[in-house]
Image (cartoon, helix red, strand yellow):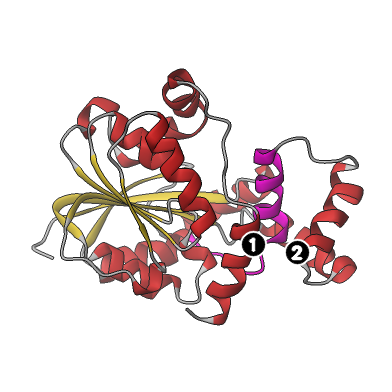
Amino acid sequence: MDKIALSVNRLYEKFPYPSLPICTERDLISKLHANVMGKILDTAGLEPDSLSGKEILDAGCGTGEKACYFSYYGANVMAIDLCRSSLQKAMQLAERFHLPVEFEHCDLAEFRTGKRFDHVFCLGALHHTRYPYKNFASLADLCKPGGTVTVGLYNKYGRLAHRVTRMWIGLRAGTDIDKRLEYVEKSIYRRKLRSVHETAYVADKYVNPHESYHSVGEVLGWFKKNGITYIGAYPHVKEGGFPAFLTQLRWMAKGSGFLLCRGGRIDGG
């Protein structure tokens, strides 16, 4: 485990993410779909009922909400994460709903398996690693021919204002996790954080010791190098070129800092 992975892991061990308040089956299905999974599945070109029997990898699963959602609809799910605290909460969630998710404690950069998957998801993890492209390539190699790869990354342009905020927090509060979180409470929220989920959200957004930023063109380049054909994105963007650049500038105005990209493997891998 390299220094970046160690520092990121320290954050998530203290603040497992996202720690969504899922207590009932309705929370897991209806609320999670409306707030999170609907956009993810739309981008991936999937419907909940199409997941049954599919082999799915959730790389960087956090506290397991996505993995449990996939499993609820009948997918065979392998979910990996570096953070033991997050995995403990993920396993508790799966046990609560009697879902047979296969969880594995693993550094994303070191993950190896003989399995191949119909759908590979890595949402919000690559940009917290030292080598995002290298790790993407390893994950893309695990996708079956005819399968899909969906990645979620911080956008280089849409997240620009937030990057300035993070720099300011660093200047005022340094690198200590607790001091940064205290500064955000006092200066940005101006109140105490109200729940485990809100604290995890704020820690991930403002306190994370490492994050990288990526353009649409860069991600499409990753796809091309690894035999993945671009299918679509959320927010919607045309494939590459100047129109894509203009779209990303509009994201900057709207504060749309998270990009979902989906591609399909059409070769033999």
Lateral position of residue 111 relative to residue 187, left or right: left
Residue 245 location in percent, x, y? Answer: 52, 57
Q: Which residues are magenta?
A: 196-215
Please say if 92 is above or below 243: above
Residue visible at 75% across and 64% down?
Answer: 177
Please say if 187 is above or below 269: above
Nearer to me, 264 or 241: 264
Element class at badge 1: helix
Residue 83 location in percent, x, y? Answer: 50, 60
Magenta region includes residue 110? no
Please say if 35 is above or below 101: above
Majority secondary structure of magenta residues: helix
Q: Which residue is mark 1?
A: 11
Residue 216 location in percent, x, y? Answer: 45, 59
Mark 1, residues whose alpha carbon is within 10 Å: few (<14), some, or many (≥20)?
many
Magenta region includes residue 197? yes
Tell me the number on the disc at residue 177. 2
Residue type highlighted by circle 2: Ile
Tell me the number on the disc at residue 149. none
Q: Residue furthest bottom?
A: 2
Residue 47 location in percent, x, y? Answer: 28, 29
Find residue 11 and report its image quarter: bottom right
